[in-house]
Image (cartoon, grey):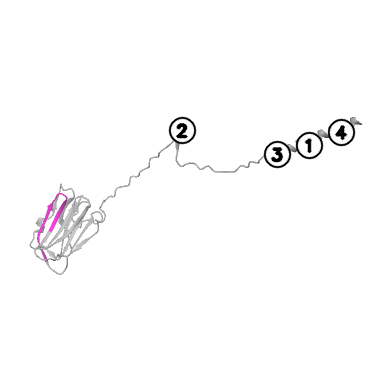
């Protein structure tokens, strides 16, 4: 009887050992954390690099440059096709002298009237492109890239030999090509033109006693 009890007790002990081991294994499975993979995106740097030994050095990219085409008619801003006007209408004027002076940085053209006073005859001075507004007539005559047209109203040259004075040509001047008469359809208008090798800046002045219209053409 005692032997049977011992065998039964030994069997119970073996059963407890097996159940305990299974319990520990199942508890370990429950306690082990579950790792979930999270997708991500790697942002690549915009700069490039070259490998040198164990270190990376950035590559410096030189900026590219573009060469823009040069304009066919370079002109200072506000020079071409911007008329300068002055003077007044209502009086008859006579040309007393037409002269020019060459200076270090400009050419000066002077129209002097026989009459004195404070009033200047009506005038219009404008610089134009010879390609866009060719000189009327005188085909084959070189007026340069541009010219300055001077048109004076009610001015006559009856006593002044303008036909023998003009044209005047300049071969060595850096800017001026020639000075000549500008043809007008109205005999009450006296026109002059200054041919230019390239567009340049100029200015117009009015002087009194004697009355004069002065055009200064500046060298670049």
Of pointers 3 and 2, the one earlier in the residue sequence = 3
Tell me which label, 4 or 1, sits earlier in the chain: 4
Q: Is residue 105 left or right of residue 27?
A: left
Residue 189's x, y, as percent?
Answer: 16, 64
Circle nearer the N terminus (3, 4) = 4
Q: Position of residue 185 (x, y in %)?
A: 18, 63
Q: Is residue 28 above or below residue 75?
A: above
- The label number, if any, that marks residue 19 in the structure image: 1
Residue designated by label 2:
55
Q: What is the secondary structure assignment of the residue under circle 4?
A: helix
Mark 4 vs 2: CB contact within 8 A: no
Residue at which label 3 appears? 29
Q: Nearer the viewer, mark 4 or mark 1?
A: 4
Q: Write the start and end of the magenta stretch as one range.
A: 93-110
Q: Is residue 216 above or below residue 87?
A: above
Q: Nearer the viewer, residue 19 or 114?
A: 19
Q: Measure the alpha-carbon separation of dots 3 and 1.
A: 16 Å
Label 3 close to label 4 by CB (< 8 Å): no
Secondary-structure class at tag 2: strand
């Amino acid at each position: 009887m005692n032997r049977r009890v011992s065998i039964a007790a030994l069997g119970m002990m073996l059963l407890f050992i097996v159940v305990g081991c299974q319990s520990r294994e199942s508890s370990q499975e429950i306690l082990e954390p579950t790792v979930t993979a999270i997708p991500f995106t790697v942002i690549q740097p915009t700069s490039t690099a070259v490998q040198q030994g164990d270190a990376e050095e950035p590559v410096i990219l030189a900026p590219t440059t573009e060469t823009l085409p040069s304009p066919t008619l370079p002109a200072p801003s506000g020079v071409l096709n911007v008329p300068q006007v002055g003077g007044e209408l209502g009086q008859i004027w006579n040309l007393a002298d037409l002269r020019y002076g060459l200076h270090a940085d400009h050419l000066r053209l002077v129209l002097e009237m026989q009459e004195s006073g404070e009033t200047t005859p009506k005038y219009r001075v404008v610089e134009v492109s010879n390609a866009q507004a060719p000189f009327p007539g005188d085909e084959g005559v070189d007026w340069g890239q541009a010219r300055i047209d001077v048109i004076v109203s009610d001015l006559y040259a009856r006593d002044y030999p303008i036909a023998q004075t003009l044209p005047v040509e300049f071969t060595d001047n850096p800017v001026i090509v020639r000075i000549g008469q500008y043809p007008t359809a109205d005999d009450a208008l006296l026109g002059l033109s200054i041919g230019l090798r390239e567009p340049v800046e100029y200015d117009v002045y009015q002087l009194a006693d004697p009355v004069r219209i002065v055009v200064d053409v500046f060298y670049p």
